[in-house]
Image: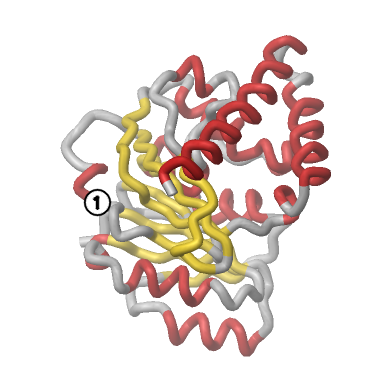
Amino acid sequence: MKIVTIIIPSYNDLRIFNAINSIVRHRDSLFLKILVQDGGSEPSFIAELKKSLRDDDELSEEGDNGVFDALNKAVLNVKTEWIGWIGSDDLLNIDFSVEHLLNHAFSIVAFETIFFKSNPSNVRRYYYVAESRMLRSFGFHLPHFSTFVRRELAQSTSFDSSCRNFADQLYFLELESRNEVKVVHKVSTLMEIGGISNASIYHIFKTNYNVFLILNTCLPAWHAGLYICGKFVYKLSQVLATLLIK
């Protein structure tokens, strides 16, 4: 019986086949359904996607306006009790277990993330989830691709694509304003570093400046400023902690 649907946004990225294999070969694969939300890839790519999916997995082909629009479309099509998501360049880690989602009253379960460069063994940063809701409201936010949500709750709101890189953070802040979060200190997702938003120091500052402008429309300026500062402090502390561990 499928318990969790793992959504993977897709668009002509060959790395998705590794992402799919990490789920198909996972020890809990019998409980995991894959939903690939493709935004218009080449016919040859789609043909290979269909070959890589199992009979009870799903491929949805529909144009979108970016990753968050794709996620909104996919979420509405989920039928399982839980929803998870990974990027096409990410991997589901063996430490993830469906058991962590069962037999409790929580509707949001957050795992930890490892960021790697090129190879999963090349670990660049651990993302440790903050236990405090107050800290999460000041930049220590839930990790997008390591947070699982019950279907009814996930479908009760949507990612606001106009908020760009802040859309996922805003989505989870909205969800946890009404629900408790269970934090599991296990790594569920291996995430590859390399998107435009973190390609350089310049892009990092530009991205967070845009997030500040978005935040400033719905929060007092002091809160928006502390949120951005909190993000920098939290991520820097994780980088330093990772270097010390290594």
Report which residue position mark 1 lands on: 98
Residue 155 in sight from this viewpoint:
no
Residue 63 appears in the picture as rendered: yes
Residue 107 position, x and y percent, is 33, 33
- Farthest residue, direction left: 103
Q: Secondary structure at mark 1?
A: helix
From the viewer's perspective, is 86 left or right of 57?
right
Image quarter of residue 54: bottom left
Residue nearest the viewer, comparing 12 with 199: 199
Q: Quadrant of residue 189?
A: bottom left
Q: Nearer the viewer, residue 73 or 189?
A: 189
Instruction: Name the image colouring.
Output: secondary structure
Question: How many numbered badges does the structure rendering display?
Answer: 1
Amino acid type shown at disc 1: Val
Q: Residue at 39% of width from left, 40% of height from top?
A: 149
Crowding near the residue tagged with mark 1, few <14, some 14–19, many ≥20 C-alpha atoms within 10 Å? some
Residue shown at the point (59%, 67%) measured from the top left: 10
Q: Is residue 120 above or below residue 76?
A: below
Residue 177 percent across, percent down from the top left: 48, 20
**At which x and y percent is residue 100?**
23, 43
> Which quadrant: the N terminus?
bottom left
Q: Position of residue 207 (x, y in %)?
A: 77, 40
In the image, residue 79 above or below residue 235: below
Residue drawn at 40 percent across, 65 percent down: 34
Using residue 212 as the reference point, say whether residue 118 is left or right of it. Answer: left
Q: Is residue 122 above or below residue 155?
A: below
Query: Which sits in the foreground, 14 or 38?
Result: 14
Up-down: is 177 above or below 171?
Answer: above
The residue sitting at 68% across, 22% down in the picture is 229
